[in-house]
Structure formats: C-alpha cells, structure tokens
Image: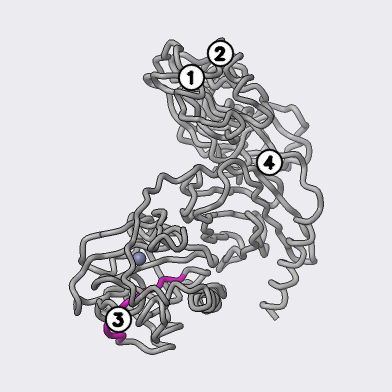
Amino acid sequence: MRRLRLLILIGIALTLAAAPLRAQEDGSTGAGAAPVTHVVQAGETLFRIAMRYGVDVGAVALANGIADANDIYVGQELTIPGQAAIDYAGYVDYVVQPGDTLDTLARRYGVTVAGLAEINRLVRKDALFTGQTLRIAPPGDAPTAPPGYTYVVQPGDTLLDIAQRCGMALDALRQANGLPFDRTPLLYPGQRLTIPGDASAPPLRALPDPIIDFTLDPLPLGQGGAFSLRLTTRRPATIVGLFMGRSFALFADDGRHHAAVFGVDRLAPPGLHTLSVYLREAEDQLSAFETSVLVTPGSYGEEYIPVPARLQGILDPAVTGPELALLAQYMTPITPVRYWDGAFSAPSGGEVTSYFGTWRSYAGQFETYHAGMDYGAPAGAPVRAPAAGRVVFAGALEVRGRATILDHGWGVYSGYWHQSEVYVMVGDIVTPGQIIGLVGSTGLSTGPHLHWEVRVGGVPVDPLQWTARAFP
Ligand SMILES: [Zn+2]
C-alpha cells in the first residue's frame, strides 16, 4: 500500500515536471577579497560583464583561462582583473537556502535590501538562487534593527505560522508585540511584528505552507558530491523530490521531519538546476515548491592506467556493459530503512592511491572517470564495513573481481572490488568495522588494492565525503 502510494506520488512528480516550469531564477554575487570576482548571472555574456567593469574582454578571458567566450555558465565565479580590491573584513558570508529572499535576509540581519543588493552587485533583486554566497555587512555599518528583527505580515499568515517559522513560542511572540493572550489577535498584511532574538535567530523564509523549514547541505552542490535535504512541515505530509531528472523520496518517521540524501553526477553540467518538492497531505491535498540550485564544478585530476595485454580483453564493451548494468540493478533500489548512522569509517588502513572523480585513460582504449577511490593495501589486508548495512551482492565479476555490495538504506550503497576473499553472504547484516573480506587483485587490476565506491540514488559520489561528515 505504502509502495503504491509512493509510486503514485512519483508519477505525479514526473507529470508536474513535464509541465513548463517558470523561468529559471538567476542572480549574482559579486565582490570577493582581492581580486574582485563576479558571479555569472542568467543572460550575461563575457562581453557584457567586461563592459560593466570597464575592462577588456580579452583580459577577463585570460584571467580566467577561458578559451571560448561562450563557454561560461550561471554561477561561475570570474576574476575581474585590474579592479581595486574591497576590504570585506568583518563581513559575514551567507549561503542562500531554499526560500531565502533579499527581504527575509535583510530582516534577519538588520540591513537594507538596497544595501545587500549594492554590496553583492545584484542586478535582479528578486532572483537569489540556492547555494549563492552573499556578503552581509557587519552590524556596525548597517542600519540596526534592535532587538531581533521585524517581520511584515503576509496575506494568509497566522500568528501560529509566524511563531513556528521563527522557531519561537506563541506566547513570546504575543508578549513582544503587545498582542492579546485571551483571544486570537487580528493580523493584517503589512503589519510589522517584532521578532525577539539576535542575529542567531532562525531566518524567516519565503516558504509556502505547510513547509516551515527547508535546508540543503552542503551548499553549493558540487559535481560528484552527495547532499542532504531536510524539510520540516507544519502538518504530516508525504514528500517526493525531483532534481536533475531523478525523483527521490524523503523519509519521515513522524511525518513532519523529512530527510533524504541525493547524489550529483560527476558529469552534471555546472550552473543552475531546478529542485522541486511535491507534498501530499491528508485528504490528498497537494502542493509543490521549487528553487534554483547552484551546482559547481569539481576539481579532479587525471591519470593514465597502463593495462597489461592479458587484461585488455576485459575492456571489451561486451564485457563492461553487462557488468555496469548488473551493478545498477543491485545499487539503485531504494530501501526505506536507514541502516547507517553518522560518518563512515575508512574500509581499509591502506594509503589512498587514487581519488574519486579522476579522469582515466585505460590503455588509451576509452576515457572515463574513476567512480570510486583506491587504497593501496597489501594482499590479504582486511576490508572492513565502513557503516552498518545489508549485503546485497557477494560474488565474482570479470572487471571488478571478487566483489561485495552493501545496502546502507535510503538509496545509499557501497561497493568493494578486487578482493581475494569475501567473508559475507547476501542477506547478512554487517556492523561498522566488521571484516567483510580481504584485499586482493582479482578482475581488472594491476596489483593488490581495494577499490571502494559509494553510490547515492544510483550515482557514484566521492566516498571521502562520507568519511568526513555525517549524512543526512
Ligand atoms: Zn578504483
């Protein structure tokens, strides 16, 4: 029943996604420390940007290593040569989250919209994007809004809505504004309410009912990276998201605090991408919200892997193709249980010999990127489960050798290739640190090493990110 409802929701999400979306938002941040940087906005050309700063277009191209003037993307940071650097000491960097607007940020930080737009060289004041970094003036230089900040009542707002969005008690809000306690106060659009607190008070956001809070982490999103979505709703709801053509479910034990993890493809085009969420409440009440999210390019190296003649046959697409399809079959289904908790530990004590995302040329036969990372451990060294999970594959593959795949739940999988021994069986539940096999050199491998990869929603992501922090 639950699965059927999820499928229906995904169907709705895909149908809505096919409908024309409103024009992509654009926006810009400006001004870095020395030298000055400009963030490309929708519709800008390199020529227009150069003209705006009164510098030569060739100089801008040269300063940024741009060979083709058309080869720029929204969100790209350009160095503007020959500009006087501005001292931003004391300024705060704020990364825009879904639902932030210049209005809500100005209220939160006690600064003016005009000031924010000026400092950040924003052309369009209505078009922030998620993941954009804004500079915010230190309180000393800005018009202050003591204490706390002011909220301007919007049509349809109730006092309870506003209190929940600000993360404060209803009575405290009544008290701060001299509102009656014994009856429901009448609010009118445009009414100004004092929100007690300081700059650390939670931001007000322009999020539609029933969404109270919505964060993405980390921002901006990088190619080949995973990110967490956390969303709180005022009332219980079921939520599916759609991003980069892939739909995904958000999980919530209590129906109100929703979370999911999502992987950005290593080859995803940098720039703005629309993230949509579709909410379904009781009695089939449907609502949706979308935001433009910045995806930034990753910086990855390249390497050439010499393949001995005896292994060349394995590079045949007739061998590699079906094996990739097999992996996709095992590493894509979404288990609604979350087995893992906290950051992953490294599956091997060996030294890292190759990182995720590196461009690779195998014997000049084909170009691809490294979908995992390699540990240079000696043959027979232990391979440990980095987190709790369930074994969904344990067997021999032609390219990947003796392989194990763990399902960590919520669409997160990890794979261990080229082992000499596999100690687990399909269906086993493994615990963090458990020895699941031994390092070897089976399959397409030129020496003993462990290849470890992590996939989220079917997309390979950087495993090191999973050892560095906890998701979601
Ligand atoms: Zn590898």
Q: Earlier in the sequence, mark 3 or mark 1?
A: 1
Residue shown at the point (48%, 74%) measured from the top left:
316
Q: Quadrant of residue 234?
A: bottom right
Element under label 2? Answer: helix
Q: Is residue 165 left or right of residue 280?
A: left
The outermost residue toward the front is: 309
Disc 1: which residue? 80
For the residues labelled 1 and 4, the Cα–Cα distance comes to 47 Å
Q: Residues within 10 Å of mark 4 (few under 14, many from 20)?
A: some
The disc placed on residue 245 is none
Residue 420 part of the magenta segment: yes
Pointer 3: what residue? Answer: 436
- Out of 297 and 465, give the one closest to the viewer: 297
Residue 177 appears in the figure:
no
The way the protein has been coloured in the rendering is one colour
Residue 229 falls in image quadrant = bottom right
Query: Mark 4 vs ligand 1: CB under 8 Å?
Result: no
Disc marking residue 159 = 4
- Residue hosting label 2: 53
In the picture shown, does residue 117 fall above or below 347?
above
Instruction: Give the residue type at disc 1.
Output: Ile
Mark found first going from the N terminus, 3 or 4: 4
User: Mark 3 belongs to which amino acid?
Assistant: Ile
160 left or right of 416 in image: right
Identify the residue shown where x is 71% and y is 59%.
Answer: 279
